Amino acid sequence: MTDPLPETTDPALLRRIEVTGWSTVLLGFLCGAVATIQVVIPIFLDRMAEAFRADDDPTRGMREALLAGGGMSALVNGAFGAALVVIGVAVARRVRWAHTALTVSGWASIAVLGVLAKPTLAPLFALTGRSASGGAGMLLASAGLLAAQVVTVLWFLRFWRKPEVRAAFR
């Protein structure tokens, strides 16, 4: 249940909190979609591989890269996504524990990004083959995206830890 809000809670702040909650739900569903794709693509590539000779299979490198870390990656994405859906609904309803849960999941998302970096990038590197320029460019772009995600999470947590936001969950 939601506790009554203090009279001084700003309606604009409450809207931002609600948007945060539903955005978290959306992010959770996106993580679930990525997990589903990570499970389905190797199956699809296995079926495609049947059409090629073993020595002339252009999907082999990507399939092997996906199989090497795809299961763990799908599991982490799926579990994290499910948690985000639950937390997001709780944030939108301003359930007391939701503030702490979203703070913890924000910090955890940085660790999850680190855990998923290799299994996420391995299939992309398999696609570029041995091309040094393609691999270096992809590594640079991936590092930039990772840094941008970390900065975004830290920026969000700066807002999320404000006393007036915390007060909305009491």
Image: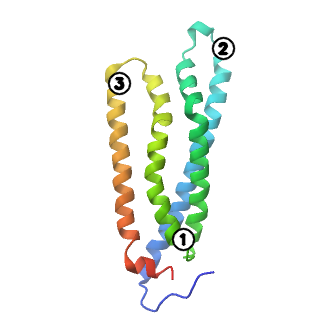
Which residue shows up at 57% across the image and 76% down it? 95
Q: Secondary structure at mark 2?
A: loop
Position of 30 relative to 72 (above/below): below
Residue 81 — which label? none
Image check: 133 left or right of 3?
left
Quadrant of residue 35 within the rendered picture: top right
Q: Which residue is mark 2?
A: 51
Which residue shows up at 38% across the image and 63% down it? 156
Q: Which three-letter amino acid code belongs to the residue tagged 2? A: Ala
Badge 3 crowding class, 10 Å Cα cut-off, few under 14, some 14 to 19, many 20 or more, is: some
Position of 57 relative to 41 (above/below): above
Image check: 139 left or right of 87?
left
Q: Residues at badges 2 and 3 in contact (C-beta under 8 Å)?
A: no
Residues at marks 2 and 1, CA–CA distance in whole angstroms: 50 Å
Q: Position of residue 86 (x, y in %)?
A: 61, 63
Q: Secondary structure at mark 3?
A: helix
Q: Position of residue 140 (x, y in %)?
A: 32, 35
Q: Position of residue 143 (x, y in %)?
A: 34, 39
Q: Which residue is mark 3?
A: 134
Residues at marks 1 and 3, CA–CA distance in whole angstroms: 42 Å
Badge 1 crowding class, 10 Å Cα cut-off, few under 14, some 14 to 19, many 20 or more, is: many
Q: Which three-letter amino acid code belongs to the residue tagged 3? A: Gly
Residues at marks 2 and 3, CA–CA distance in whole angstroms: 28 Å
Which residue shows up at 57% across the image and 47% down it? 77
Of residues 72 and 35, which is closer to you in this image? Answer: 72
Q: Which residue is mark 1?
A: 98
